[in-house]
Amino acid sequence: MSAEAPYLRPRPANYVPLTPLSFLGRTAELYPDRLALIDEDRRFTWQEVRQRCDALAAALMDIGVKPGDVVSVLAPNTAEMFEAQFAVAMAGAVLNTINIRLDADTMAYILDHAETRVLMLDRQFALMAEVALQRTKGGRPVIIDLGGPGDALPGSQRHSDLVRSAPADFQPVVPADEWQTLCLNYTSGTSGRPKGVLYHHRGAYLMALGTIAGWGLSGHPTYLYTVPMFHCNGWGHAWTMTALAATIVCCRQISAKAVYDAIGSFGVTHFGGAPIVLGMLVEAAEAERPVLPHKVRVMTAGAPPPAAILEKVEALGFEVMQVYGLTETYGHVVQSTWEEEWNEMDVAQRATIKARQGVRFPMMETAEIRDVESGKRLPKDGTAMGEIVLRGNTIMKGYHKDEAATEAAFAGGAFHSGDVAVQHPDGFLEIRDRYKDIIISGGENISSIEVESALYRHPAVSAAAVVAKPDAKWGETPCAFVELKPGASVTADELNQFCRQHLSGFKVPKCYVFESLPKTSTGKIEKYKLREKVKTTP
Amino acid sequence: MSAEAPYLRPRPANYVPLTPLSFLGRTAELYPDRLALIDEDRRFTWQEVRQRCDALAAALMDIGVKPGDVVSVLAPNTAEMFEAQFAVAMAGAVLNTINIRLDADTMAYILDHAETRVLMLDRQFALMAEVALQRTKGGRPVIIDLGGPGDALPGSQRHSDLVRSAPADFQPVVPADEWQTLCLNYTSGTSGRPKGVLYHHRGAYLMALGTIAGWGLSGHPTYLYTVPMFHCNGWGHAWTMTALAATIVCCRQISAKAVYDAIGSFGVTHFGGAPIVLGMLVEAAEAERPVLPHKVRVMTAGAPPPAAILEKVEALGFEVMQVYGLTETYGHVVQSTWEEEWNEMDVAQRATIKARQGVRFPMMETAEIRDVESGKRLPKDGTAMGEIVLRGNTIMKGYHKDEAATEAAFAGGAFHSGDVAVQHPDGFLEIRDRYKDIIISGGENISSIEVESALYRHPAVSAAAVVAKPDAKWGETPCAFVELKPGASVTADELNQFCRQHLSGFKVPKCYVFESLPKTSTGKIEKYKLREKVKTTP
């Protein structure tokens, strides 16, 4: 075949930049009257969602939002929050959803760093936002009042006015290039300032199709949005569920009752949540736990679901799949797939499999472990621990205004997750620790998670964090910080004996500190503070 | 947001050219021991398929195949044919699968036009190929003997030797650019020379993910390959089923018994085929029609499944979805989706819906009808007839060595299908005719398909073709060419009366010609010959 002739170039007929906006266009065209959103007493069809998105996009352009400007949103999972996942891009702007649980200082940092042009604000967070706005260094953004409980900030424009109707000739902006930035999502790091992760249209499109293929979604699911939409665009399900013309049930406040009610009232078929949500469902009072009318499928992430919880929640009729990912990977990129033949196994075996993070989703190219020092690929032997490195089209563009961190994250041609795992012979990854939390004692790697898991099994322990303590002989040794349950008591000796029963000797902590653990606003334990403290602990 | 910083460019970690080769890589890595191929008495796991593809790719490179060279295949649906869908691209070459039912002249034309460097040849077609090769103008390609019944051509290299093992350090070629040509598929036009349709890696990847989403595929299907792999790479299912780590059952010869046996023996869950295959299943002797052990899903294309066949085949336990597409669109791009609430309808209503071609697949951007003269978009009123035009990422790059035809196909910024349809208010397309087969009589459009359908209902008619006859008064009038069933007889007057009962007056043919109809080697009626003939018909 001779060199490519110019007439074989990409053209509008055969090359369309990949973008999740295509999904909204198709679904609104083909399923205009199908129910799209349930938000408390409100109902919107897909045609209405499309019209409201058009109107909001037109309004943002009227306000003066230019292509590439950042529109931030501070809201729980409402219809407005869902629509923002599309409308902001339809104005050519970049969506920045802010974690509602952040402190005012961090919010102010984000608003400044993102150079937020417009802030869409649910009244529930108006006071917090006002404090943050007063601490920003930049100019005050235009505020759009999304409604909700409480009062709007003075000078806000009302969202309900803006979404009434778009100009008759309105055409949404479509990306000229699929690499164009779609979102700016800040990490919730446990140390230092959050980093601004940039997503592009191509990645969002492939995230949706890859999730459909990987999770085996079909038909029109009814999806309960328990996962905050400010986390990786709600794990990308805003796009995925739109592609499927699903019905999305918004959820301002998660409780076991809310989940069971939504299943009963709306026929919810799918939802997502951290293992703590599964725990809630199991621990709900008998009266709140109806017999499920159909199988409900749950995507869980953040930590392996404990075997006891998994067993109980599956007995209730839920089908749980663990996934793994980071803000930098648009959310889930590894999944604990399930093979039918494993149904024959006993509960303990099944829980062991489901506790593993799994294998890469179809849209990912590689997910492997590499030695942290040498960068060499490690064997799939279930023993060698290395950093999970990833390659694929749903990896971020990079960090906003942070070239150094971007280059570090992509060193060696793959994305460094910072998570340390083993890879089993069947390819399943199983996380052992965050890279910086690994303790190296006498040349042996100790997973702080493994030691913490042992401590959590003690009935007196409410929370535990294990960090490396510098040691003249061993290099490092594990030091345990322990928070006890109210009214419980245990001594360091007793804990030490307990650990010896459950851990290899070299993994048993050499010191125990009893105290209330420092936590971020999102509930993550701030290990970096403990690492500082441990240097002065005798 | 300021202008994009260079460090936010695509890199190997976050940008991987889309290619179906990624699916084989992932499936072979994650499901090495899962059964991939069943071909008569042979069985191959995904690891074995991958190894055989590596070895074949290495062998092709040894033979001297260079990036962009064309490797043609003439074979039925065998393991070798399936593996060629990947191995040829893994050598950087372009796959050209040739329709086994073509005549030697057309085959020779294709071998010359494609500049075939290597011909992979099943012995079943060795004699036909030899005739074709002797009629080519170019040099004789290297022949790889794929086995099969009969003798190999002299001088062939044995495929079974070539796939034994790849060099230890072998790395398949991966496309540097997702726009790179993957396949060259010749149309089976009913007039003139076939055109060479060029596919790229991006389109094949998106075809697979779009099919999974649109057909709602999940788990690991067992797919019976009744659709010839030389048609649009077997409707793209070679890639789709690989992405799902399916089990593919090869099928050299299609019969009702073969289908039922495969369902019984291998647990086939999915297959595809023209409505004639459905007819075979319905007409099979009672003894050959076992009760299906599970729901079997069928994708059908080429013509709307007749209501009577549809009713019977669904009663047997098959779930049928009609799709529409062309070689130029990588196969199916429009699907007759099914909504659960339609299950309440009676059989006739359901058949009416299923007879429509449907709505665009998720990977398609637009599928609409446009007025042939003005190019204006026509309303979705179920009445206005216009040409189906399509836009999306699974539209061909263009025609090989045919710039004029490419420009014509893409005129006005969309791909012209040449098919004339109405679009119903719910967006469903329903084909009325091929553009060139439409008859314009007194300014009214007459669908030749509609007139033919009326004729087919007459018990004496075996085949019918209706073409435009030039007419001084009306411009054109319909002229019917009719082939009768053996032993049947009917007069022109009787047919005319029959048509008056079933058609509007202006659609009733003005002349009837009784004769055996000219057909291509693939069984399509050659209307262009009838159009020539009608000019001299009184």
Image (cartoon, coloured by chain):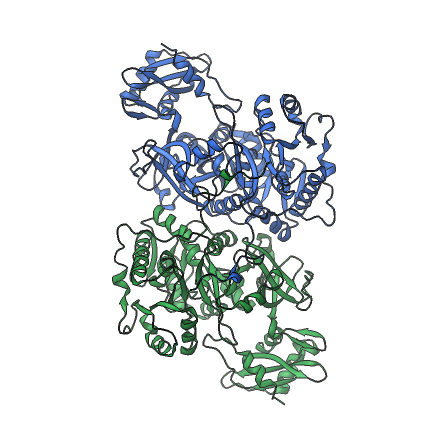
Chain colours: A blue, B green
Q: Quadrant of the N terminus of chain B?
A: top right
Q: Is residue A412 above or below residue B215?
A: above
Left or right: residue A301 versus residue B52 is right
User: Can residue B318 be seen here?
Assistant: yes
Residue B78 image position (x, y, % from top left): 35, 64
A179, above or below A284, in the image: below
Q: Nearer the viewer, residue B67 or A247?
A: B67
Whether residue B244 is visible to the viewer of this picture, yes or no, is no
Tell how many labels: 0
Q: Quadrant of the C terminus of chain B?
A: bottom right
Quadrant hosting residue A499: top left
Q: Indicate the position of residue B373 as horizontal and vertical percent values.
A: 68, 69
In this rendered view, identify the residue nearer to me: B190 or A291: B190
Q: Position of residue A81 (x, y in %)?
A: 62, 36
Q: Quadrant of residue A310?
A: top left
Question: Which residue is depicted at the point 60% across and 82% down?
Answer: B480
Which residue is at a point 53% across and 22% down the rendered structure image? A521
Rendering coords of residue A72 (x, y %): 62, 33
Give the residue at the far bottom of this rendering: B538
Q: Residue at x 36, y 25 (%)?
A: A438
Give the residue at the far top of this rendering.
A538
